[in-house]
Image (cartoon, rainbow, N blue to C red):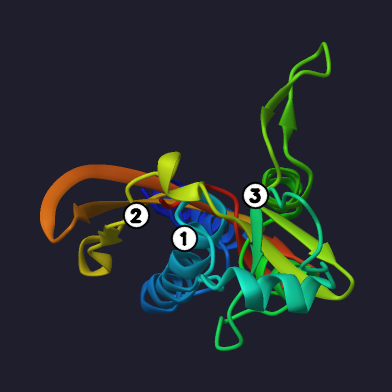
Amino acid sequence: MKKIAAALLLASLLLALLAGCGGSGMGEEEIRETFRTLVEASYELNEIYFGSGLPYEVDLETMMRLMGITADMEEVVVNYMPVTKDAAYQSEAEIREATKKVFSDDICSHLFMLGFEGLRTDTDESVSFARFIEEQGILTVRIDLDEEALPMGRTYDFSRMEILIEEPERIRASFPSLLDGRPAETVRITIIKTADGWRLDSPTY
């Protein structure tokens, strides 16, 4: 009996040790707050990359003055307009920096291509033009983004988090979501640990 008890005690200690080695080192509440902070920070970025972008100047004369376009030109084709002075971001660098604070490198690479380069097929045909172009130090935004914008009203119920995977450098959890305040599907979200802290490795829009 003593040998059996000792074996059971050893097994339980080993299981506890393995569980400790496999976890993130954070308690459940800290995990919840990490997800909450990153996901809530992503809402604004989702609007920039998948929604209507940033507010832009609607006055053509203001645009021409800012961009150095002279009034004697016969025709001015406007696809991009300067963002307003009170827009949350005034340069491509600012948007990139904010994105890096929320998303993993892999997600950032896709977002930067979508935002600043545009998407192309294997035959180099344009699928989607860049959402933003910086010209002469002025950030401009494509004016037709509303036509391709995705619905942006999704939020999450963090109080009902279910942890699916917890590893030292990766945590995956599910959250019931709300779309425009109405119950929607449960979404699985992954965060990964980087040299700069935890970052989202999943879309949240």
Q: Which residue is mark 2?
A: 152
Q: Is residue 165 visible?
A: no
State the image coordinates of residue 86 (x, y, percent, origin top left): 55, 88
Q: Which of pointers 2 and 1 lies earlier in the amino acid sequence?
A: 1
Name the residue tied to disc 1: 47
Checking the image for residue 131, the label placed there is: none
Q: Amino acid at mark 2?
A: Met
Across and down, in percent, residue 92 comes to 77, 68
Q: Residue 159 versus residue 88: which sits nearer the camera?
A: 88
Cα–Cα span, label 2 and label 1 = 7 Å
State which tag comes first along the sequence, 1 or 3. 1
Q: Quadrant of residue 9?
A: bottom left
Whether residue 198 is visible to the viewer of this picture, yes or no, is: yes
In contact (CB < 8 Å): disc 2 and disc 1? yes
Q: Secondary structure at mark 2?
A: loop
Front position in the image: 9 or 194: 194
Q: In the rendered image, which residue does mark 3 sit on?
A: 79
Q: Say which residue appears at 73% left-offset and 46% top-offset.
A: 106
What's the distance in space between the residues labelled 3 and 2, CA to CA?
23 Å
Which of these two is toward me, 20 or 118? Answer: 118
Is residue 111 shown left or right of residue 20? right
Secondary structure at badge 1 equals helix
Alpha-carbon distance for marks 1 and 3? 19 Å
Q: Earlier in the sequence, mark 3 or mark 2?
A: 3
Q: Residue at x 73, y 70 (%)?
A: 64
Q: Report crowding for label 3: few under 14, some 14 to 19, many 20 or more residues within 10 A (C-alpha).
A: few
The disc labelled 3 sits on which kind of residue? Asn
Name the residue rendered at 66%, 52% in the picture: 78
Contact flag, marks 3 and 2 (Cβ < 8 Å): no
User: Which residue reaches farthest top?
Assistant: 123
Q: Residues within 10 Å of mark 2 (few under 14, many from 20)?
A: some
